[in-house]
C-alpha cells in the first residue's frame, strides 16, 4: 500500500527538483543558513511537487497505458482509483502549501502555486497533448523549484531569481528533447505533440544546440552579476561548454538513441554540478 502511494508521486522527479531547490536556497542565503527554514522549504516544495506529479499521473493515465515505459504505473494498472489519486494529490498540495506559508513567506507560496498551476492545468491538461510548445510551457514549471528556494531565503524576486529561472528553463529544453528522442516510439504511439515527433530528430538537434549554447551563456550570469565566484564560473561554465560540445556531436551521431541518452545523463550531471556550486561558491 505504502509503495503505491510513494511511486505515484514520481520520487525521481521530486529528488531531482529538491536538488535545485537546495541550490537556489543556498544562493539566496549567501552563507547565513537557517537550517529549520531550509528543511521546511525542501519538505514544503517536495509535497507541492508530489501533488503535481499525482495530478499528472491521473491526467495522463490514458496515454500512459500506451507507452512502454509508463504502462505499469499504479493508476494504469488500476492499483489505485482515480478518486483516491485526486484526494491524495489535493492533500499533498494543501500540506505543502500550508508548510511553506507557515515557515517561509507569501512570495514563496505564490511562486510554488504558480509552478503547480502551470504544470497541472496549463501543461498536463492542454499543451502536452495539443501543442508543439508543450515542452516550453513545461520548462516554466520545471524552473520554479530553485526560485522557490531562493525566495524562501530572501523573500525577494529580484535579478538572482530571474537568472535562476532563465537558467533552469533553458536547461529543461535539451533535457526533455533528449528523453523524447530515445523514447521516440512511445511518444509517437501516444501522439504527444513534442518536437521530435512533429518536426523530426534533425530539427530537434538544431534546437538542442541552440538551447545548450544559451544555457552556457546564462550560467555565466551568476558570476557576471556578482552572485557567485570564479570557481563557479570555471566549473559550471566548463561543464556547460562540454554539454554544448556533446550537442554538436549529435549532428554526426550514428545512433540517435545512444547519443540522446548521453545528452540526458549529462543534463542530470550538469544540473547537480550547477546546484552544488551555487552553494559552494556563493558570494557572501
Image (cartoon, helix red, strand yellow):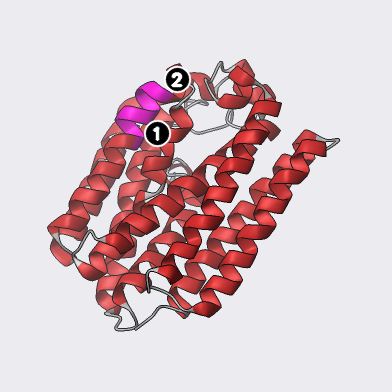
* 270 versus 75 height, above or below: below
**Quadrant in the picture for residue 120:** top left
Q: Which of 238 and 184 is in front in this view?
A: 238
Q: Is residue 187 magenta?
A: no
List x then y, in percent, for residue 245: 72, 52
What is the magenta range? 119-127
User: Which residue appears at 50% of the width and 71% of the height?
Assistant: 276
Reading the image, the residue beneath label 2 is 131
Left or right: 73, with 252 as reference point = left
User: Which residue appears at 69% of the width and 27% of the height?
Assistant: 201
Q: Which of 260 and 2 is in front in this view?
A: 260
**Quadrant in the picture for residue 178:** top right
- The reply to whether callout 1 and callout 2 are in contact (CB within 8 Å) is yes
Residue 137: mark: 1
List x then y, in percent, for residue 52: 35, 40
Q: Nearer the viewer, residue 55 or 193?
A: 193
Instruction: Of the two numbered discs 1 and 2 on the same chain, state the one appearing first in sequence.
Output: 2
Quarter that holds the N terminus: top left
Query: Callout 1: 10 Å neighbours few (<14), some, many (20+)?
Result: many
Which residue is situated farthest in the front direction here?
Answer: 224
Amino acid at each position: 500500500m505504502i509503495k503505491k502511494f510513494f511511486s505515484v508521486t514520481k520520487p525521481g522527479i521530486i529528488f531531482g527538483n529538491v536538488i535545485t531547490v537546495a541550490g537556489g536556497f543556498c544562493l539566496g542565503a549567501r552563507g547565513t543558513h537557517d537550517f529549520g527554514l531550509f528543511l521546511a522549504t525542501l519538505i514544503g516544495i517536495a509535497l507541492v511537487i508530489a501533488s503535481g506529479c499525482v495530478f499528472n499521473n491521473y491526467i495522463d493515465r490514458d496515454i500512459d497505458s500506451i507507452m512502454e515505459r509508463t504502462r505499469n504505473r499504479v493508476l494504469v494498472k488500476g492499483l489505485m482509483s482515480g478518486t483516491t489519486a485526486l484526494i491524495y494529490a489535493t492533500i499533498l498540495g494543501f500540506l505543502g502549501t500550508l508548510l511553506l506559508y507557515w515557515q517561509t513567506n507569501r512570495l514563496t507560496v505564490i511562486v510554488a502555486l504558480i509552478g503547480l498551476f502551470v504544470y497541472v492545468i496549463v501543461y498536463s491538461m492542454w499543451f502536452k497533448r495539443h501543442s508543439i510548445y508543450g515542452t516550453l510551457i513545461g520548462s516554466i514549471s520545471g524552473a520554479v523549484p530553485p526560485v522557490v528556494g531562493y525566495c524562501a531565503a530572501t523573500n525577494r524576486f529580484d535579478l538572482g531569481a530571474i537568472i535562476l529561472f532563465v537558467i533552469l528553463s533553458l536547461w529543461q529544453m535539451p533535457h526533455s528533447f533528449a528523453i523524447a528522442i530515445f523514447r521516440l516510439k512511445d511518444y509517437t504511439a501516444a501522439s504527444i505533440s513534442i518536437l521530435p515527433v512533429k518536426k523530426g530528430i534533425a530539427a530537434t538537434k538544431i534546437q538542442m544546440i541552440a538551447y545548450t549554447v544559451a544555457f552556457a551563456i546564462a550560467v555565466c550570469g551568476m558570476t557576471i552579476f556578482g552572485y557567485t565566484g570564479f570557481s563557479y564560473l570555471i566549473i559550471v561554465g566548463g561543464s556547460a561548454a562540454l554539454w554544448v560540445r556533446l550537442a554538436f556531436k549529435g549532428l554526426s551521431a550514428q545512433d540517435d538513441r545512444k547519443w540522446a541518452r548521453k545528452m540526458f545523463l549529462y543534463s542530470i550531471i550538469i544540473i547537480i554540478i550547477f546546484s552544488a556550486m551555487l552553494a559552494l561558491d556563493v558570494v557572501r
